Image: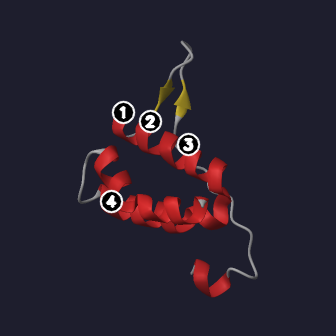
Amino acid sequence: LYDQFRGKIDIELVPWGNSRLLPNGQISCNHGQSECDANRLMSCAIDIVKTKQAIPFIVCFERQLTTYPQVEQAMHHCSTFIRNDYR
């Protein structure tokens, strides 16, 4: 859908959308620490390369999380998107 409508829409990606800030200042994610780690990584990608360039990475990353349960494995599988766009 993004490719089809990219010139007609603005997208704001919110990786922490379902997280909660606890009274002790920590963040609680719906699916535990792995989800918090993934949210942190996606937030960094969005901050560094901005939304337009981060979308291919995030799509790849989210898909890989179903195959590679470890955030680091999924990130390495998809990091080409970030390396290419960041250059």
Residue type at mark 4 is: His
How far, Cα to Cα, is label 1 from label 3? Answer: 12 Å
* SS for callout 4: helix
Q: Is residue 10 visible?
A: yes
View extreme (bottom): residue: 4
- Answer whether labels 3 and 2 touch (C-beta < 8 Å): no
To which residue does mark 1 refer? 33
Q: Which kind of residue does numbered mark 3 sit on?
A: Trp
- Return the x and y of residue 60 as percentages of the image width and height: 41, 66
C-alpha span from label 4 to label 2: 23 Å
Q: Which of the two discs, 4 and 2, labels the residue nearer the N terminus?
A: 2
58 lies above or below 71: below
- Coloration of the structure image: secondary structure
Q: CA distance from mark 2 to mark 1?
A: 7 Å
Q: Residue 55, percent across and down?
A: 56, 65
The answer for how far apart the CA atoms under marks 4 and 1 are is 20 Å
Mark 4 or 1: the one toward you:
4
**Residue that extends furthest to the front in the rendered view of this protein:** 87
Mark 3 or 4, closer to the camera: 4
For the question of whether residue 32 can be seen, the reply is: no
* Residue under numbered circle 3: 16
Residue 29: which disc?
2
Residue occupying image coordinates x 25% and y 49%: 69
Say which label, 4 or 1, has the lower sequence index.
Answer: 1
- Residue drawn at (65%, 48%) of the image: 47
For the residue carrying disc 2, how many other residues have a C-alpha within 10 Å: few (<14), some (14-19), or many (20+)?
some
Mark 1 and mark 2 in contact (Cβ < 8 Å)? Answer: yes
